[in-house]
């Protein structure tokens, strides 16, 4: 999958959004007290997973002291703890922990990406930044030829996937985000919505572990049904 490797490098070298470039570099230099010993990645974060994946998970963007520190999407923060534990629970990952790029984590039949590849200030990319990063999502989906199920983590990721999917095919019905909702595109891709496993959602109980697992249990059943 040389083309996917080229895409990873292209993403990691990207400086197309001045605001995001300045912010991720600033965070990587200043750090936070608990991670002072880390050498931060401080670059855009490529996707991660199995090139033959049938499940694609899309989030919003790397966390300033998560993916922006470790260099791997959803790695090194609480959201990643929830995500990879769920992927492990349903057979998409070989371990439940994701702490750094050399921790031995491997994904099977699953690939994880994000709508925006740089950590944004206040976790809020601008409309222009979404548009600038969208071609990377489109190129991932083009290269990941077997994707049949998509789990979108949060409304923004849900809407961004639909925007990207509008290029290869329309969506049947009138999709509206909700936890546990599902829709099918004209090309047969099943889109599942989930609340994002952010601390704001998990600490308040808006998203429980059982609720989160139910989404990935459904994803597992859809993927298994393709066999």
Image (spheres, rainbow, N blue to C red):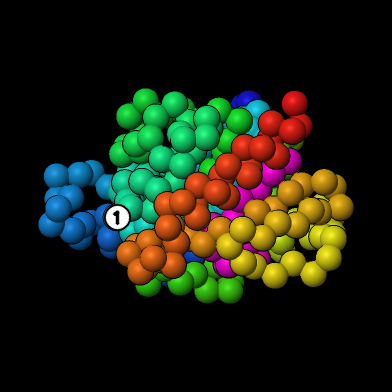
> Residue visible at 57% across and 38% down?
111
Please tell me in which quadrant of the rendered image residue 85 appears. top left
| 14 in relation to 174, above or below | above
> Residue visible at 18% across and 50% down?
35
For the C terminus, which image quadrant? top right
For the N terminus, which image quadrant? top right
Asked whether, in this view, residue 215 is left or right of residue 68, the answer is: right
Asked whether, in this view, residue 203 is left or right of residue 180, the answer is: left
> Residue visible at 75% across and 57% down?
183
The residue that disc 1 covers is 65
Q: Which residues are magenta?
A: 148-161
Q: Is residue 3 visible?
A: no
> Residue visible at 74% across and 49% down?
190
**Is residue 152 shown in magenta?**
yes
Q: Is residue 219 visible?
A: yes
Badge 1 marks a residue whose secondary structure is loop
């Amino acid at each position: 999958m040389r083309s996917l490797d080229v895409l990873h490098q292209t993403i990691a070298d990207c400086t197309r959004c001045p605001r995001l470039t300045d912010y991720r570099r600033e965070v990587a230099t200043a750090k936070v007290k608990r991670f002072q010993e880390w050498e931060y990645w401080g670059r855009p974060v490529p996707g991660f997973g199995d090139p033959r994946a049938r499940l694609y998970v899309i989030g919003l963007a790397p966390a300033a002291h998560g993916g922006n520190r470790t260099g791997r999407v959803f790695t090194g923060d609480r959201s990643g703890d929830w995500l990879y534990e769920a992927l492990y629970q349903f057979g998409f990952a070989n371990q439940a922990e994701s702490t750094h790029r050399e921790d031995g984590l491997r994904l099977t039949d699953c690939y994880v990406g994000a709508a925006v590849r740089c950590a944004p200030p206040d976790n809020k990319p601008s409309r222009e930044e979404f548009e600038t990063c969208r071609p990377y999502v489109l190129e991932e989906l083009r290269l990941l030829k077997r994707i049949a199920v998509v789990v979108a983590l949060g409304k923004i990721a849900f809407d961004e996937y639909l925007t990207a999917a509008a290029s290869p095919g329309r969506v049947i019905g009138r999709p509206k985000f909700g936890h546990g909702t599902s829709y099918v595109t004209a090309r047969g891709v099943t889109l599942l919505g989930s609340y994002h496993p952010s601390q704001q959602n998990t600490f308040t109980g808006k998203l429980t572990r059982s609720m989160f697992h139910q989404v990935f249990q459904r994803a597992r059943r859809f993927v298994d049904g393709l066999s």
